Amino acid sequence: MTNDTILKTQGLGKDFLGFAAVSNVNLQVRRGSIHALIGPNGAGKTTVFNLLTKFHPSTSGSIHFNGVDITHETSVQIARRGMVRSFQISATFGHLTALENVRVALQRNRKDSFNFWSSEKRLDALNGQAMALLEAVDLASFADTVAIEMPYGRKRALEIATTLALEPALMLLDEPTQGMGHEDVGRVVELIRKVSKNRTILMVEHNLSVVESLCDTITVLQRGSVLAEGNYATVSQDPRVLEAYVGVEA
């Protein structure tokens, strides 16, 4: 594993009751890049994310992050190392404001993390940082808006802000544009491009125009295994990829 590589898997696999959901996945993510995992439904993309972040234990293989073997670490340990993920479904606190959502995430870096019985005034010291993060994702005007009342695309931006609050070295974004209209997709694409300048991003994405626009490297999965890898021009012209997506030989 070189200094240019932030994440590497070797022979990564996961069986569920004898069914191989992920098989022999060798993944290498370059530091400072935007790397996409794509593939048809059921290809194993989210399962790979779950293995990387230890929501599921792997059946086989190894995972190295920043040169350290994290194969047997817990989700909490991995997050503390700087690998942080979002989910397909927006995971914000619906009845807190945007500012309060980010402030909750910022508490993670305090010694008194999650002392919910503490005076709210003690948390006001985090407001400046929280507002800076909201400004970074173009949500400053939504600071006092309750999350449940925000448009869907803005909720996804809020989730990215709460992820950034954990100061990740590697952000894992699971379907960041899922269910969005054209305008929201464009906004989130620009947001991802903006926040990627100082960190590495690994994303699962179905929208191939988003992948083409953003990603340096693309890994294509099919039936839990790596089918192809390269830049968009390379994988989009691979006849195996076309067959996997449209079901006909190219």
Image (spheres, rainbow, N blue to C red):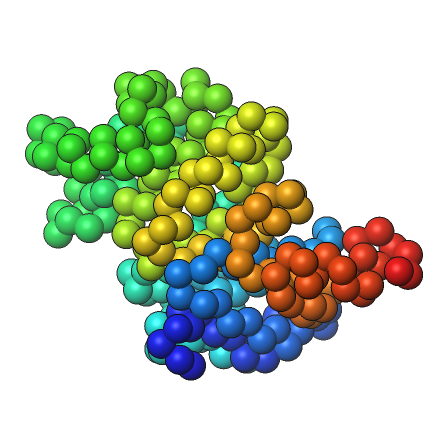
Please state if 67 lies on the left or on the right of 209 as rendered.
Answer: left
Does residue 16 show up? no
Q: Which residue is situated farthest in the right direction here?
A: 249
Q: Position of residue 175 (x, y in %)?
A: 57, 45
| Closer to the camera in the image, 218 or 99 | 218
Please state if 79 lies on the left or on the right of 20 as rendered.
Answer: left
Which residue shows up at 37% across the image and 45% down it?
195
Which residue shows up at 23% across the image and 43% down it?
106
Q: Quadrant of the N terminus?
A: bottom left
Rendered position, 124 above or below 29? above
Does residue 28 show up? yes
Which residue shows up at 9% across the image and 28% down it?
121
Please state if 92 lies on the left or on the right of 21 as rendered.
Answer: left
**Residue 43's image quarter?**
bottom right
Rendered position, 68 above or below 82? below
Which residue shows up at 89% across the image and 60% down it?
250
Rendered position, 81 above or below 207? below
Q: Position of residue 111 (x, y in %)?
A: 12, 52
Q: Which residue is situated farthest in the front direction here?
A: 233
**Residue 128's image quarter?**
top left
Q: Position of residue 34 (x, y in %)?
A: 48, 56
Q: Position of residue 199 (x, y in %)?
A: 35, 56
Q: How many marks?
A: 0
